[in-house]
Amino acid sequence: MKNRLVLLLTGVGGYVDAVSYLALGRVFTANMTGNTVLLGLALVQGDTAGAGRSALALGGFLAGGALGARLVARGPRPAVWPRGVTVALIAEGALLAALAVTHLAVVAGESTLVAGRVVLAALAMGVQSAAARRLDVSGITTTFVTGTLTNLMSLIALHGVVPGAGGQSKRLLAAAWVVYILGAMAAAAAMQTAPAPGLLVPVVLVLVVIVGAGGRYWSDAGP
């Protein structure tokens, strides 16, 4: 159950990152490695607006990560799924809902600053990253895949590709990579065919995770 919920969050990461790149001015709000590269390129190319968006995404992600770290630290004892993680995901869901509302306003023709939407998306992904780090499922980060692929290749190098030592972790890491791609693909399709409700998808996915984790783990996570 826990592994499936973390994979859903990974899909959210891929989805939001793709939407940010396609609809928020070619900026990443989950993958800060790529976003840092975009910032460097924009600075050299004299793209002030692009540099500003990348800087806002970085700042929002860092702030979200700090907020998430404070939230996930709640709780007096270790648990399979700490209550603080669920609280952090509620905060993430609220941020993504606000992003979806502002995105709907833009599609409807109302003026909403791109900067504000970039910050909302980056805040949400920072919070999610902190939640995933607290859960620590086979090194899956849910918001970028560099570390995931590094961990996967390390296990394959040590134990081979066949089932055996590290088999479950290898499957989870490979699944996380695939799910991230599928999330990005779903976002691309949504932006082409249904841009108005497109950002409701990650809100629904996070809600599913919150409900699933709350129903399964809340009573086991301490007072």
Image: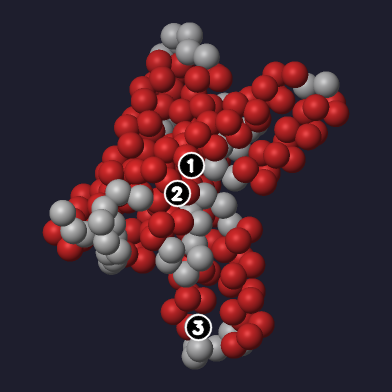
Residue 131, placed above or below residue 138: above
x%, y% of residue 35? 66, 39
Return the residue at label 3. Answer: 166
Mark 2 vs mark 1, CA separation in Å: 5 Å
x%, y% of residue 61? 53, 37
The three-letter code of the residue at mark 3 reads Gly
Mark 3 vs mark 2, CA separation in Å: 24 Å
In the picture provided, is 108 more to the left or to the right than 18?
left
Q: Earlier in the sequence, mark 3 or mark 2?
A: 2
Which residue is painted at 70% across and 19% down in the image?
49
User: In the structure shown, which secondary structural element does the residue marked by tag 2 occupy?
Assistant: helix
In the picture provided, is 25 more to the left or to the right than 141?
right
Q: Residues within 10 Å of mark 2 (few under 14, many from 20)?
A: many
Residue 188 makes an appearance in the image: no
**Residue 134: which quarter of the image?**
bottom left
Which residue is painted at 40% across and 16% down in the image?
105
Return the residue at label 1. Answer: 65
Callout count: 3
User: In the structure shown, which secondary structural element does the residue marked by tag 3 occupy?
Assistant: loop
The three-letter code of the residue at mark 2 reads Ala
Q: Earlier in the sequence, mark 1 or mark 3?
A: 1
Mark 2–mark 1 CB contact (< 8 Å)? yes
Return the residue at label 2. Answer: 130
**Dot label at residue 172:** none
In the picture provided, is 178 more to the left or to the right than 198?
right
Mark 1 vs mark 3, CA separation in Å: 29 Å
User: In the structure shown, which secondary structural element does the residue marked by tag 1 occupy?
Assistant: helix
Residue 104 makes an appearance in the image: yes
The three-letter code of the residue at mark 1 reads Gly
Residue 121, placed above or below residue 14: above
Q: Quarter of the image for the C terminus: give it.
A: bottom left
**Residue 158: which quarter of the image?**
bottom right
